[in-house]
Amino acid sequence: MNKLNKQASLQWRITVAYLMLAITACVIFTVIAALAVEGIEDRLVDQRLKSVAAWASPRHFAGLPVEIPAGVIFYHGNAIPTSLRGLGPGVQEQTVDGVSLHLLVGRDAAGDFVVVDRESDYDKIELVVYSIVAAALIALLILSSILGRYVARRFVNPIATLAAAVMAKDSRTELPLLANKDEMGVLARAFSERTAELQQFLVRERFFTGDVSHELRTPLTIIIGAAEILVERTAGQPDLQAPAQRILRAATEATEFVTVLLLLARTPELIDAPETRLGPVIEAEMESGRQLCRDKPVSLELFLEGDPAVFCRRELLAAAIGNLIRNACQYTEKGSVIIRASGHSVTVEDTGPGIAQAVRDRLSDKAPVSALAGSAGSGIGLALVKRICEHLGATMQASDRPGGGMVFTIEFPSNLTKS
């Protein structure tokens, strides 16, 4: 399977979604906790000061003793310390001599008063509460990240397993998750049914190609035999010899084409792959190319790198390379056709007019935007080359040649090349 970008993977997005949900919940919870803490402060401290003032003020006005709870001081009139005078009315916090005090400043019938809470531990309690909340939020984020990864793996792993099974080379392997009752089971069964249909179609196509090819071999054999007799009996009659040779050559090429179709109708594993030297195969195909170039100013050259060889049936190799050479020779009016071969690739370079866009679309498995015209035969030949390459596990690449023309390259996999 192709490697996925981490940020594009479904597992990563599920984990991030869990984490974002946790962050959102943490923000909401933090706001609620802050409002609750402030509300509690108002109830515990502010209301306490107001209650003390409501109880102490009338007793002080009546001259009765004022028994204040421990930690709370009630100042009235001139008894108010200088540092606490001039403050606005209401509950407030002030720092006096480095000490944080909760104050209630008010006025009764006898004058101003101040209630001071010196020993309030609410700030410490508030710090503890916020620390606990912060620790809980961090733990929630960590737990959400772990849970998100766990859920993502539980969700994505079956998909990855199913995808690996679908892409497996062995079509006989049964897909996993077929017995599942959930959506993954439905998806697995849909893939299984579709794969079975495609396999049946491929089998029917293979049998059809094989049957047709077998049926064609008998008449082609008869034509070749008759053409050989004609060539032999028309010796010395140039006007009859040339047509007889063309018939023999065309019938021979058709027989080779049928042989290639028969090989393509079989699975690659069932075809023997002897070591085939590229040099003799290319030189034999170049002879056909020279017949196409004999009346044109076109040179045909071969450059071999060592003595390259490929483990492949000669018929398939000759059909692939021969089609490239014949196409190049047929459509190149002047210039050169150059073949380069090494142990891992064969390149055919020409100075012709190039290929039509419709042919390019067919080679790239795209729907052609226009119908094949002009070089339709070239398109069919190249399509056969591509089919042979796919059958062998090789690749064919087509690119424009600088200055005009085309460059076709067949890249053989390492298991087909001679080390």
Image (cartoon, helix red, strand yellow):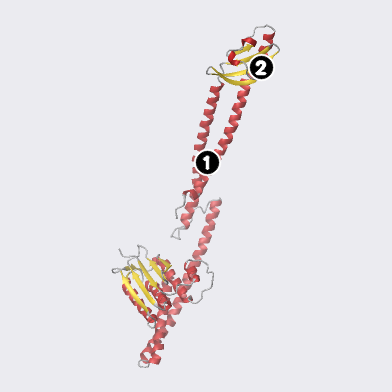
> What residue is pinned by disc 2?
106
Q: Is residue 395 left or right of residue 74?
A: left
Residue type at mark 2 is: Gly
Q: Secondary structure at mark 1?
A: helix
Q: Secondary structure at mark 2?
A: strand
**Label 1, label 2: how many angstroms apart (C-alpha)?**
50 Å
Q: Quadrant of residue 76?
A: top right
Q: Are marks 1 and 2 in contact (CB under 8 Å)?
A: no
Q: Could you say which disc has been placed on residue 19 in the image?
A: 1
Pick the residue in front: 118 or 13.
118
Pick the residue in front: 210 or 280.
280
Query: Does 19 appear above or below 366?
Result: above
Which residue ends up furthest to the bottom in the rendered image?
Answer: 237
Mark nearest the camera among 1 and 2 is: 2
Indicate the position of residue 111 as horizontal and vertical percent values.
Answer: 68, 12
Pick the residue in front: 343 or 96.
96
Indicate the position of residue 12 as horizontal and vertical percent values.
Answer: 49, 46
